[in-house]
Image (spheres, rainbow, N blue to C red):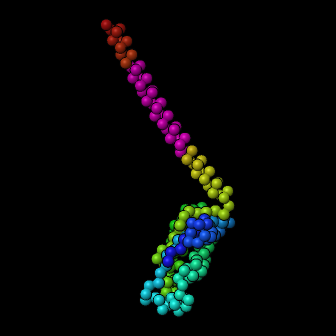
Amino acid sequence: ITRYWTNEIASGTTQKSEGFEVETNDSVTLILDITCTAMIDEPNTPMFLYRYPIGKLESVMDQEVRARIQTELTSEIGQASLEEVKTNKSQYISNVRDRVTKYFAGRGLTITTLGSAGGLNYRNPAIQQAIDKTVQDQQLVISAEARFQAQLTENKTIKAAAEAAADAAKIKAEGEKQA
């Protein structure tokens, strides 16, 4: 069974907003989209049914697996700043995957995939707008530097052509003078 728990309504497994809301240590609330696939290997069936007598994998995933992921994400990201999360997001997700996979292996459930299903979403849209503006400004700086370097190259080319023309005129004038 695969679950897509996303912030966007109608993009996940259900028609609800189910992204994982977590807060960084500098109090920025993020919403992460997570995908998770789980199965019950035949040898683990007795253990799974002992733990979950109703035996519905969908229910276990939507309740206990989801709750465990939320707990682990909160623990992992709650210790980090926003900048650390942006830089190390894949490592945090990997740490969560390792702990969740290990936990459920002891309960008869095999987690085959657990990962991010999108980028970081911010509860406050102004944060994303500020990040987008920063990236745009950085790109403008890079673009301006490229235009500056191109102009320097063009100026050197024009200067070299002018110097070559002046040298040619000088040589011609000397030749005519000697003639």
Instruction: Check the image and report above or below for 50 versus 25.
Output: below
Given residues 119 and 135, the one toward you in this image is 119
Residue 78 in the figure: left or right of residue 38:
right
Pick out the residue farthest to the left: 179
Q: Which residues are magenta?
A: 141-167
Is residue 119 one of those drawn in magenta? no
Q: Residue at x 60, y 75 (%)?
A: 70
Q: Position of residue 5 (x, y in %)?
A: 57, 71
- The structure residue drawn at horizontal position 35% and vertical position 16%, both measured from the top left corner, is 171
Q: Main secondary structure of the magenta part?
A: helix
Q: Is residue 151 visible?
A: yes
The residue located at (52%, 90%) in the rendering is 49
* Res 69 quadrant in image: bottom right
Q: In the figure, 177 relative to 121: above or below? A: above
Residue occupying image coordinates x 55% and y 47%:
139
Task: Pick the residue in front: 139 or 17.
Answer: 17
Q: Pick the residue in front: 126 or 60.
A: 60
Which quadrant of the structure image shows residue 156? top left
Does residue 150 belong to the magenta stretch?
yes
User: Where in the figure is residue 117, as x and y percent of width and height?
Assistant: 53, 67
What is the quadrant of the C terminus in the image? top left
Q: Is residue 105 visible?
A: no
Q: Position of residue 33 (x, y in %)?
A: 57, 68
Expressed as whole percent of the image width and height from the top left, the position of residue 169 reads 39, 16
Left or right: 169, with 10 as reference point: left
